[in-house]
Amino acid sequence: QACAIDLVQQLFKTYKNQFAIVVSTESIARHWYCGKEKSMMLSNCLFRNGGSSILLTNKRDLKDRCLLKLKCAVRTNIGYDDEAYGCCIQVEDPQGYQGFRLTKNIIKASTKAFTENFKLLLPKILPVWELLLCNINSREKINRSPNLSFNLNLKSGVDHFFFHPGGRALIDRLGKSLGLSEYDLEPTRMTLYRFGNTSASGLWYILSYMEAKKRLKKGDKILMVGLGAGFMCNNCVWEVMKDGLEDTRVWEDCIDEYPRKDLVNPFTEKYSWINDECLNFVRTQD
């Protein structure tokens, strides 16, 4: 979604008084895997169908009606790294079954892409005095090691953090590296629990959660962190333009039940038979 938003941003520099609709969607139909490779079976469990859309405009007359204002967008792709390129890719297994392979290197790749992105993003979102507090040693460490060790107070420039709901390990890693609390990570965790990984649309589900919980107020800054195949990291920073955003949208039927303390997957035991060779009827043998 950040790629599309960045494209619209560039178009708006040339075309005045325009509207643009950005549609973010995920469909698992083409990626359903019927083979036996565990690294390719994960996508069947993690990804879910989902979709969302957002209306963008550069019409000054509509400024008072806008909910969010785009402050900046930074895109990073590390496809030049073979390990990063192959950690999240559509391939065929030895039996000829096509699927989406996710390897253990995805955490390392996402960390590297995120670090590269932040070196460009931080000067755009943090106040000068906060950047000056970052000592020379910390800067050198960021430049030579992709360990996400930032000696900065990110909340001096950002109020809310929306991470790509790609998995619990990824959320834990980003939260720990950036020094965020469980309250900060709650919207992302709850979105992952209820909807799974809906790719780019997941970030808008997180925004909807924050609206439903009435946690957004005018002037707040939101950092949306998007991660995906490539491997790439695309981030957007938004400013809330209105108080009282409280549309429940996709959370309307259950928002009062969240946040949940028990995040154990309720389907793990119910559908454990899917890996049983005797009971599995999803895959047919030749």
Image: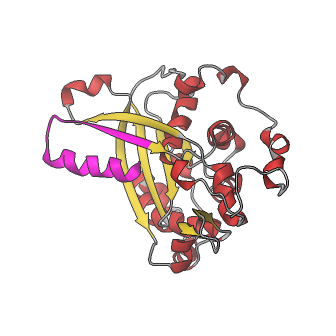
Q: Is residue 13 magenta?
A: yes
Inspect this view and state whether residue 159 appears.
no
Residue located at (71% from left, 61% from top): 285
Q: Check the image and tell me how it is coloured.
A: secondary structure
Q: Nearer the viewer, residue 44 or 164?
A: 44
Q: Which residues are magenta?
A: 1-24
Q: Dividing the image into 4 quarters, which one contains the C terminus?
A: bottom right
- Left or right: 96 with respect to 80? right
- Left or right: 139 with respect to 237? right
Residue 204, x across and y down, in percent: 49, 37
Residue 134, x across and y down, in percent: 54, 65
Residue located at (48% from left, 22% from top): 245
Q: In the displayed structure, would residue 105 be above or below residue 169?
A: below
Q: Nearer the viewer, residue 260 or 245?
A: 260
Q: Nearer the viewer, residue 209 or 43?
A: 43
Inspect this view and state whether residue 240 appears.
yes
Residue located at (31% from left, 22% from top): 65
Q: In the displayed structure, would residue 61 be above or below residue 82?
A: above
Residue located at (53% from left, 30% from top): 208
Q: Nearer the viewer, residue 16 or 277?
A: 277
Q: Is residue 243 magenta?
A: no
Residue 71, x across and y down, in percent: 35, 45
Q: Quadrant of residue 105?
A: bottom right
